[in-house]
Image (cartoon, grey):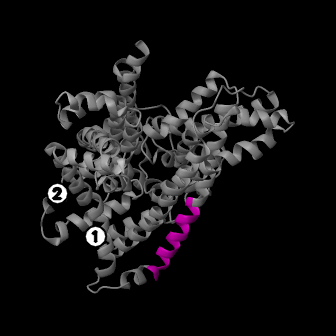
Amino acid sequence: MARSQSAALDRKKLMADPIMVTTIVVLITFLTLFILYPLAILLVDSFVGDGSFGFGIFERIFAMPTFTKAITNTLKVGFLVGILSALLGLLFAYVEVYVRVGKFVGGLFKVVSMLPVVSPPFVLSLSMIMLFGKSGIITRFLLGIYDNSVYGFWGIAVVQTLTFFPVCYMMLKGLLKNIDPSLEEAARDMGASRWKVFTSVTLPLMLPGLGNAFLVTFIESIADFANPMLIGGSYDTLATTIYLQITGSYDKPGAAAMAVVLLCITLAMFAVQKYYLERKTAATLTGKASRGRMLIEDKSVKVPLTILCGLAATFVILMYLCVPIGAFFPTWGYKFFPLTGKWFKLIFTRYHGLQAFWDSFRLSLISAPITALLSMIISYLVVKRSFKSKGFIEAVSMLAMAVPGTVLGVGYIRGFSAGVFRTGFLQGLYGTGLILIIVFVVRSLPTGTRSGISALRQIDKSIEESAYDMGADSFKVFMTVTLPLIKDSFLSGLVTAFVRSITAISAIILLVTPQFLLITVQINEFAEKGSYSLACAFATILIVITYGAVLLMNLFMNHFGTSKKMKED
């Protein structure tokens, strides 16, 4: 009874605040128009795209051998990449948390965890082709192998595993740190070997988290467009098939139906991951470890695990270094020395590199603060306010996490090329920079929102209530009290949004027009043509930009962030 009265009072206070009501209405409109509406249009097109309501389009696409094969290919790659990434991530996480490693190996782990964040999504595909392709440095020039092919199933699987396993590593590292060491030490005191302790105590405790890591990677793998496009060859996946269906066959209803199939797979996996495994993990691992863990120093365990992880981390780093090195080779595949900077000169003098970097930079720079602010506002409403549509705002803002970029791109084409519901309303968005900015915002919104929700849950409600008692309105409270307290999350969301936007390709490759030259699209085009040195030169400058943004953010937070002030106090 008291709870219902409190909720009713909160709603009454909310309705008396015009700024808050306006913010909620604007947010609901934005989320509905730019997330739900494009997905709804895909469903409509899938059933009525041929002029009559029914399953005709689905029957047509499922009759295509290429499409059914693409589904099988996508699931095979997704399952293998999910399993390999989870296992490799578990190995790295276990070694860091349980084994006493040196500073050098620890530094390698940090670099490996950061590289996928600051690099374009297809950098490893470029490296794999340049090292192990038909004109690869290792295969052709070191081993003398001429008939190998790195393209296809195994090429995609290896590249995606190396790209996505750091995500599993970061997830599982946090889970392992939260396991109470006393549980494992009790088993050791009873005579169990380290392997027995791991299989009977540690592994069962983190199985839900391991499943969670698998599903996250599985979703990332089946939604990936850039890597299969570059290294897939004739091995088509759902993401590349949808792209080819709309750009090669000009079959928009068919592409919409294919996008719905891919969306259903990702949504099903996302629902399992979000509403089952996350809760199970939270129930299994509660709180922090009661005391410090005694790290393994036994050489029979420490040496092989450290060497294995060190070699794997070094290989991944060398794969990433291959791209900037390849940008200095005179002629890729034939002549590697002397090194030259002619490709960097060419991209600015002949291939409109300056426009590509400027277009990408300004669009990402515009979208980043919008994304960060929207994320914090949504987080604030979800955590600190009680109203009926709160669940809708949270669910829809997180929905973009489960929507593959290719699916979203097709949805925007079908939803806005002729205006909203074919009425011409907002048709002017299509083909402009504004629609690219909106896509960037929508794609980065879930990451910032999750970060904001975690930060806001640590702030006591009484801090804001005292500001309200002194006469401040909701806007004043949010800007002067709440936002300064979570500015670390805000700054982190700002840089994450910028990096995700400037390295995006799957959602925008279908929407970009000749009016805008984006770096990732240029890299993709040159790589497809076999101009690997030019692609490497573009990718190298992009990596420098993204790494510089992350470095600046870290320096700024170290000097001006709330964590710095807390340490000083």
Q: Picture quarter containing residue 456?
A: top left
Q: Is residue 64 magenta?
A: yes
Q: Picture quarter containing residue 308?
A: top right
**Which residue does the numbered mark 2 point to in the structure image?**
429
Give the residue displayed 45% in from the left and 35% down from the top. 324
Give the residue displayed 22% in from the left and 50% down from the top. 24
Give the residue displayed 57% in from the left and 26% down from the top. 107
Q: Which residues are magenta?
A: 62-78
Asked if residue 18 is positioned above or below residue 420 in the image, the reply reads: above
Q: Picture quarter containing residue 566?
A: top left
Q: Position of residue 209 (x, y in %)?
A: 59, 48
Which residue occupies the extreme front position in the image?
1
Which residue occupies the extreme top position in the image?
568
Q: Is residue 91 visible?
A: yes
Q: Is residue 520 magenta?
A: no
Which residue is more in the foreground, 517 or 219?
219
N-terminal label among 1 and 2? 1
In contact (CB < 8 Å): disc 1 and disc 2: no
Which residue is more in the foreground, 248 or 405?
405
In space, the residues marked 1 and 2 are separated at their CA atoms by 16 Å
Residue 41, disc = 1
Q: Position of residue 464 (x, y in %)?
A: 28, 31
Q: Is residue 479 left or right of residue 487?
A: left
For the C terminus, the quadrant is top left
